[in-house]
Image: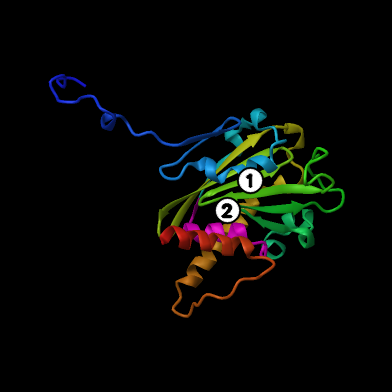
Amino acid sequence: MPEFKEVKDFPSGSDDLRSLPLHQWGKLLFASLGQAPANSFPPMEERMQWSPMDKLVHRADLSSEHVVQANWALYVENYLEGFHIPFVHPTLNALLDFGDYTTELYARSSLQLGIAKKDEACFDIPAGHPDHGKKVAAYYWWVFPNLMFNFYPWGLSLNIVRPQSVGITRISFLTFVADETKLGEGAGVGLDQVEKEDEEVVEAVQRGVRSRNYAHGRYSVTREQGTHHFHRLIAEMMG
């Protein structure tokens, strides 16, 4: 700092640039302006410890940006409930066994476990893992408030949800591939089409909730655990 040598007690700790919490998982780095992101990651990292995070290669050609005409929270809600899969995603529904679709809740994250139908592509999960023996087609992890980690046998689709305004949201789809030989198989196929189907529904919901006749309903015990969990975390953050 030029022309500051006469300033009393300079430099001091208060003159330093602010340090932000940083968390590394494989090749991925996560920072936060608030609570350390590492506090939200342990359940996912422990469950996915066998996943080849160090082998992930970012594929810009398979990544994309989407702008949704809806509030960011509505987009997250849609991701967290499994109700709509059989009705909105015909291709995905043909690959997943909807009857075995489950949701698990953690302090600041949740997991939706997609089980493959017979003969569809699934993970080769090592012995001793809690999911060993299950035909897991996809791990859908959500980390509060705006990160979605979609693990498929070929790698990871990381979705970042960024509010642009009250009614506009930008979604970044970042694709990381670990095994190119498995691209084009299973639940990780046609993600752009799945996104378009989700956007259509979410934008319709946005129009609906702005109606003077809208009133919120109740939660499904079997299919909306993740949505209820998300709402409780938002309420907690809002005080």
What's the magenta region?
67-84
Q: Which mark is residue 43?
A: 1
Q: Earlier in the sequence, mark 1 or mark 2?
A: 1
| Residue at x 18%, y 20% (from the top left corner) | 2
- Please identify the quarter of the rendering in which residue 230 is found: bottom right
The front one of 191 and 53 is 53
The front one of 125 and 213 is 125
- Please identify the quarter of the rendering in which residue 5 is found: top left
The spot of residue 13 in percent (x, y) is 29, 29
Between marks 1 and 2, how big is the CA–CA gap?
9 Å
The spot of residue 19 in percent (x, y) is 38, 33
Q: Point out the residue furthest to the bottom here.
A: 213
| Residue at x 67%, y 34% (from the top left corner) | 177
- What amino acid is at disc 1? Pro
Q: Which residue is mark 2?
A: 107
The front one of 17 and 158 is 17
The front one of 167 and 223 is 223
Secondary structure beneath dot 1 equals: helix
Asked if residue 73 is among those painted magenta in the image, a careful observer would answer yes
| Residue at x 73%, y 53% (from the top left corner) | 114
- Mark 2: give few (<14), some (14-19) or many (20+) Cα within 10 Å: few
Q: Is residue 14 toward the left or the right of residue 183 in the image? A: left
- Labelled pair 1, 2 in contact (Cβ < 8 Å): yes
The spot of residue 158 in percent (x, y) is 59, 42
Above or below residue 222? Residue 195 is above
| Residue at x 76%, y 60% (from the top left corner) | 98
